[in-house]
Image (cartoon, rainbow, N blue to C red):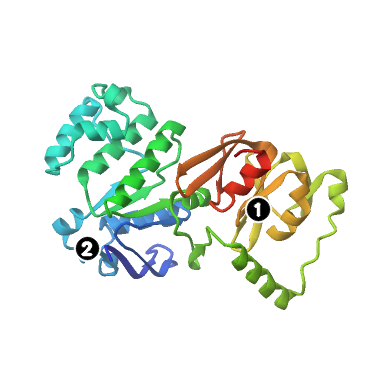
Amino acid sequence: MSLFVNELNYIDDKDKTTVLEKLSFSISPGKSLAISSNVTHRQLLIKILEGRVRSANKHILVNNYHPGNTIQYRSSISFYYEHPYTYDRLNILDHLTFYKKLYNSSKSIPDILEITQLNEIAKKRTNKLDHSQKKRLQLAILILQNTQVIVFDEPDQNIDQYTKNILFKVIELLLKEEKCLLILTGSMESAITLSEECYVLSSLGLTLINTEVEDEDEKAIIEEENKVNGPEERPAFSPLELNKVVAKLERNLILLDIDEVKFFESASGNVQIHVADTMLPGLYTMNEYEATLQDRHFFRCHRSYLVNLKKVREIVTWTRNSFSLVLDDRTEVPLSKNKIHVLKEMLGIK
């Protein structure tokens, strides 16, 4: 394994609470793994992987080196940070020339400029770049570093669609080069879209996100649930006669217009209803919502998502196996590869 984390523990020195407990995962060459977590867990993991938390060193291995083996370890791992650092007085070409020499890289600068689509602005100073252009420069530097393990911190946040397309191409390129990619994000949608192996990190540890479930597996899950809970019956959603969906907010029940709902999201057995810029706890299971709302323009685009098709603006193909739906407000929802053909048939697309 090129990246190996074994029973990693971390206790906060101030309040003595356990933040991480027996966290274990590994990534092999040519593979990626995404972890969705809160900002505390994400920043802590980055500090640990940077080698800044000495107590965690023995639990981390990159190419068989612990963070304590400073030179060997740092030459094997690189980071793509949420907020890129650049030298304002240098232009893009100056940056790449500097880093090519620093890392003694054999990579071609013209090729990297082409991959990241920075060739037309190569002589532009970085203090004149927008955030998305700076992120593409960071991708270019990442390619030059050519390390075996790469840690991405919120790679697709606050970047334009053009840069997001380039990000996916670079990820594909890195995987073809047998790199190990760890993707850390606060968004479960991003985790699902960016990697086929995805987890949610909480105080309970890592929980696998099932990104793809075939029909037979789905049937087996439902049958098992029926054994425990009895056969599922279509819920009597009387509010639907009024075109309403019921959500819960503390002790109150909220009646939402069906057309207000963007999508339903299921995580750890709980359903959240996304409306405008907020989300509210649902009262029913995802299967119940699907059974009741499938005639109301809602589509089960992913095991964990039920989307309002009236809100969908674009179907985006990131890679051969990665798709998403872009809604009117530019929110993205994952689209399973085994659902893309169903959706196309529904829309009359050949």
Closest to the observer, 339 or 87: 339
Instruction: Measuring from the top left, give residue 31's x and y in whole percent.
Output: 35, 58
Provide the secondary structure element on which disc 2 rests.
loop
Type of amino acid at the residue the image marks with label 2: Asn
Residue at the image position 76 percent from the left and 50 percent from the top: 293
Q: Residue at x 45, y 47 (%)?
A: 320
89 shown above or below 38? above
Amino acid type at image mark 1: Gln
Position of residue 123 measured from the top left corner of the image (x, y, whole percent)? 23, 21
Q: Which residue is mark 2?
A: 63
Q: Is residue 284 at least partly visible in the picture?
A: no
Q: For the residues marked 1 and 2, what is the alpha-carbon distance in whole angstroms?
A: 40 Å
Q: Quadrant of the N terminus?
A: bottom left
The first of marks 1 and 2 along the sequence is 2
On screen, residue 181 versus residue 123, left or right, reads: right
Q: Residue at x 26, y 43 (%)?
A: 142
For this orientation, the residue located farthest to the bottom is 227
For the C terminus, which image quadrant?
Answer: top right
Task: Find residue 20 and report its image quarter.
Answer: bottom left
Number of residues whose C-alpha sits closer than 10 Å to that of mark 1, classed few (under 14), some (14–19) or many (20 or more): many
Residue 81 in percent (x, y) is at 34, 44
Which mark, by number, is residue 35?
Answer: none
Residue indicated by mark 1: 272
Say what secondary structure mark 1 lies in.
Answer: strand
Quarter occupied by residue 47: bottom left
